[in-house]
Image (spheres, grey):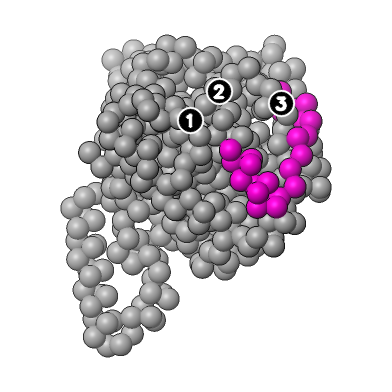
């Protein structure tokens, strides 16, 4: 899309100059508040006339015939799609290593993963190649790479952003998310993209979206009224990396210093969230991906041996090993002798999670927890261990199951050569120096701020308060 982006940028420059000469610059930016600003787009969100492959061989050569609703709304506001970004194939993965194009590297240290599945968009923003980026979430695919790359990543309430034009993975869980250097970089695009869409029956209006157009940091007086819950199930997790735990403890101390009341709460149902999530997500994935059959679009392998063999050959050659694994598991769960028990139980646990989380928010304003159990890991370290990779989503999937919003905030870093693990004061200090030296074990750590449904304005204002106290914490650190 780069050539098109240059032409759109020239047109934006001309429009701005003409408005300036006519004394109508304020009116122009009121109509097009994102005029001329480039954004990165994940490879599963449709842009008319451009390739859309979901980083899969089975969609090689496919060109999107229309814009996704979120793309239309951004472009109507003047934003410019800079290019499509790498991802795990069909958004199935936590490291961007399951891509037919190869992995996306972490811009802070290139021997590490950028996270997934929205690792391409995240790396582009973190490397300062785009002001903000679009990703998609089914179980943590925006927040997890945001944590790994040291930027902000928002997963909105289910339905706030239309899924029209977004390739489906798990339809009851999928949601478009936004990545940025600051909460303000996320808030304005969110306000412009949100709202009911006639093409998506699950879409919904976002209350208080006007507040997002000029985001204000939460005041100290409001912090004094804030009630924060920390699930003890996450604090007691055996997989929690000590450096991540240190950053989380520092972040908790910041909330307490601001006057917030913090309680550790017991939510036993969270222990079943990862199992419930994978039963539901993989079942829906198996159903959604059945449309890729070599008949209507994408790659087709036809040896003239009949339709059954065409399906087998096309899907065997087109899908990668992780996608095949998830389709097989999903179809097994949905099989006649199995689905009545397991799928129903998974949905029952999901309903319980929604009820228990909603009940918790009757007494608390915010859930605070790490974004993921570990920091970024080295390329190849987990790619052959699916169970270990799936556990990367241990702290994120409950948000998708409960359909609530959550933002990953860059709060600190792990220990490196000459650098102690802990809270990040901004990326102009020791952590930046460690990144410049290439310390492989000094990497960013994110913490989640999760709120009740449609509380995007509140959690972004809390994140903005963090940014105000830690300026530059979501800035790129490795310009090389």
Q: Are marks 1 and 3 in contact (CB under 8 Å)?
A: no
Mark 1 or 3 closer to N-term? 3
Q: For mark 2, what is the residue? A: 242
Magenta span contains residue 251: yes
Q: Are marks 1 and 2 in contact (CB under 8 Å)?
A: yes
Q: For mark 3, what is the residue? A: 233
Mark 2 or 3 closer to N-term? 3
Q: Residues within 10 Å of mark 2 (few under 14, many from 20)?
A: some
- Residue 357 lies in quadrant: top right
Q: Which stretch is magenta?
A: 250-271
Q: Residue at x 28, y 81 (%)?
A: 19
Report the Cα–Cα distance between label 2 and label 3. Answer: 16 Å
From the top left corner, tell me how far across and down residue 61 is, in percent: 26, 35
Q: Nearer the viewer, residue 26 or 220?
A: 220
* Label annotation for residue 178: none
Find numbered disc 3 in the image and state the secondary structure of the residue it sits on.
helix
Report the Cα–Cα distance between label 1 and label 3. Answer: 23 Å
From the top left corner, tell me how far across and down residue 275 is, in percent: 65, 21
Q: Is residue 318 left or right of residue 282?
A: left
Residue 98 shows up from this direction: no
* Label annotation for residue 421: 1
């Amino acid at each position: 899309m780069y050539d098109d982006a240059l032409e759109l940028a020239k047109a934006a420059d001309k429009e701005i100059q003409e408005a300036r000469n006519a004394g109508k610059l304020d009116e122009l930016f009121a109509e097009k508040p994102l005029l001329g600003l480039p954004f990165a787009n994940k490879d599963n969100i449709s842009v008319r006339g451009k390739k859309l492959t979901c980083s899969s061989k089975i969609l090689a050569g496919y060109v999107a015939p229309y814009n996704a609703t979120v793309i239309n709304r951004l472009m109507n506001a003047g934003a410019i799609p800079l290019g499509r970004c790498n991802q795990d194939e069909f958004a199935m993965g936590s490291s961007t290593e399951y891509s037919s194009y190869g992995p996306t590297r972490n811009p802070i240290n290139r021997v590490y993963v950028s996270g997934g599945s929205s690792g391409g968009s995240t790396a582009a923003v973190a490397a300062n190649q785009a002001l903000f980026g679009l990703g998609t979430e089914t179980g943590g695919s925006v927040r997890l790479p945001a944590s790994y790359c040291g930027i902000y990543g928002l997963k909105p309430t289910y339905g706030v952003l239309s899924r029209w034009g977004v390739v489906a993975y798990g339809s009851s869980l999928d949601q478009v998310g936004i990545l940025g250097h600051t909460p303000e970089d996320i808030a304005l695009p969110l306000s412009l993209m949100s709202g009911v869409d006639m093409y998506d029956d699950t879409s919904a209006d976002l209350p208080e979206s006007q507040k997002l157009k000029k985001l204000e940091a939460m005041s100290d007086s409001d912090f004094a009224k804030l009630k924060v819950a920390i699930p003890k199930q996450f604090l007691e997790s055996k997989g929690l990396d000590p450096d991540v735990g240190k950053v989380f403890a520092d972040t908790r101390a910041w909330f307490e210093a601001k006057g917030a009341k913090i309680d550790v709460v017991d939510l036993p149902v969270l222990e079943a969230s990862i199992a419930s999530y994978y039963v539901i997500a993989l079942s829906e994935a198996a159903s959604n991906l059945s449309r890729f059959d070599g008949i209507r679009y994408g790659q087709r392998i036809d040896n003239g041996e009949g339709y059954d063999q065409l399906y087998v050959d096309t899907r065997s050659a087109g899908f990668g090993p992780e996608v095949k694994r998830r389709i097989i598991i999903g179809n097994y769960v949905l099989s006649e002798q199995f689905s009545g028990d397991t799928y129903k139980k998974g949905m029952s646990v999901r309903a319980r999670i929604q009820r228990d989380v909603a009940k918790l928010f009757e007494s608390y304003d915010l859930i605070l927890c790490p974004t993921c159990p570990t920091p970024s890991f080295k390329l190849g370290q987990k790619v052959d261990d699916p169970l270990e990779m799936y556990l990367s989503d241990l702290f994120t999937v409950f948000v998708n199951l409960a359909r609530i919003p959550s933002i990953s905030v860059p709060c600190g870093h792990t220990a490196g050569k000459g650098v102690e693990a802990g809270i990040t004061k901004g990326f102009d200090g020791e952590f930046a120096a460690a990144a410049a030296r290439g310390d492989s074990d000094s990497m960013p750590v994110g913490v989640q701020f999760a709120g009740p449904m449609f509380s995007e304005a509140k959690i972004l204002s809390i994140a903005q308060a963090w940014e105000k106290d830690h300026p530059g914490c979501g800035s790129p650190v490795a310009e090389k």
